[in-house]
Amino acid sequence: MDKTIGPSVVIHINRLIKNYDQIKKKLSRSNLMIVVKANAYGHGGIACANALEKHGCKSFAVFSISEGIQLRDAGITSDILIFSKFNNSYLELAIKHNLILNISNIKDLIDLKEFSKKNKKSPKFHMKFDTGMTRLGLNIDEADEAFKILSKNNELKYEGLYSHFATADEGDLSFAYKQVEKFKDILNKAELFGLQFKTIHFSNSGAVLNIDQKDFNLIRVGMLIYGAYPSNEVPKDIDLQPVMEFKAPIVEVRRVDKGTQISYGGVYKTEKESNIGVVQCGFADGIPRPWYKNGFVGYKGKNYKIAGRICMDQFMVNFEDDVPSQGDEVLIFGSNDYNSISMETIAEEIESTPYVIATGINGRTEFFYQN
């Protein structure tokens, strides 16, 4: 392959597996639910799920029913939870593909009950309660009604009970602990109705680092598995490795005079005679445009500043007196033998999150999977 074609991503499967093992080691347990929604946060849902399942992972989560079906079609046999809101059109598909649905309000539970009675079958499902995210989830005051329906309808295949933290990756955990107390009240109510859920889960990546997991027998892990911390306010006490390596080729190098304007708007001017490299990757490919202000790339062990605004298809780099080779690649983020630039560094600078950066890599970028 001509290495000057365009941007590329290398997904390091060996790093993914190492991260999985490191997270299990920290938690002293093996029952992890790995979140592979949004194409595994941009890393390739099928490839990541396949590798993790072969390594022993028995539970995954995605957002949409179509994502779940894609994993089944690719041969994934582990549990797959669908996060999106329940829809009646999902019922037959969920049963056919052995997918676990999300029940997050009373109406959906009643619809599911009526379907199950009429058809003498039921998809498996987890019941979600809202304890403070104010997104999907039953209200706490609906617990009695919901648990009454479960206790009186044996055909319903309820398996899990869960909620979602809103602030588990923040420095102030007071609200997160209030959510935990609300969730414990819900668990106590379930016991009063004689209900036993196979899985109880609450934690996201922030909670894995910040909050005791003893009350939950399944741990949801998202961004951590891909080697990035969810925020700068969590303890960084797991030896994580970035799974994604994003790079792009230098397609032209030119020597310019001091004071030369670079890119749109002319907001960047060289302070001395410099070598400017044109890199074939733009914001349409996934490099965040705001990163140009203080951004840099890695090349052969050194970091070089981005010169001027990032264009749709290309951006420029000031190599100063160093002379890069046309066709060589620069590291945008991730790590290789020479450089390391974290998604967290970019996210902090542009007031974003690693989640946005990882999922922002678009269709022109070639993906390669390396063990």
Image (tube, rainbow, N blue to C red):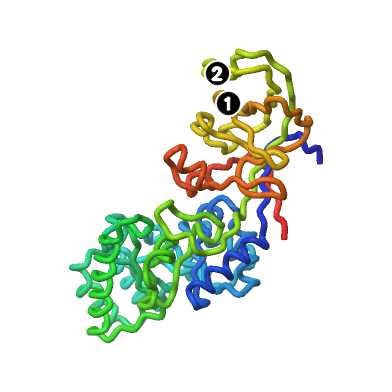
Estimate the x, y position of residue 211 in percent, counting from the top left: 37, 68
- In percent of width and height, residue 15 lies at 64, 61
Instruction: State which quadrant residue 175 falls in.
Output: bottom left
Mark 1 surroundings within 10 Å by alpha-carbon count, few (fewer than 14), some (14 through 19), many (20 or more): some
CA distance for labels 1 and 2: 8 Å
Residue drawn at point x = 44 percent, y = 60 percent: 235
Is residue 105 in view from this perspective?
no
Q: Which residue is mark 2?
A: 264
What residue type is disc 2 on?
Tyr
Residue beneath disc 1: 311
Q: What is the three-letter code of the residue carrying label 1? A: Cys
Assign a secondary structure to mark 1. loop
The image shows residue 282 at horizontal and vertical percentages of 60, 31
**Looking at the image, which is closer to me, 310 or 80?**
310
Residue drawn where x is 78% and y is 38% of the image: 3
Which is nearer the N-term, disc 1 or disc 2? 2
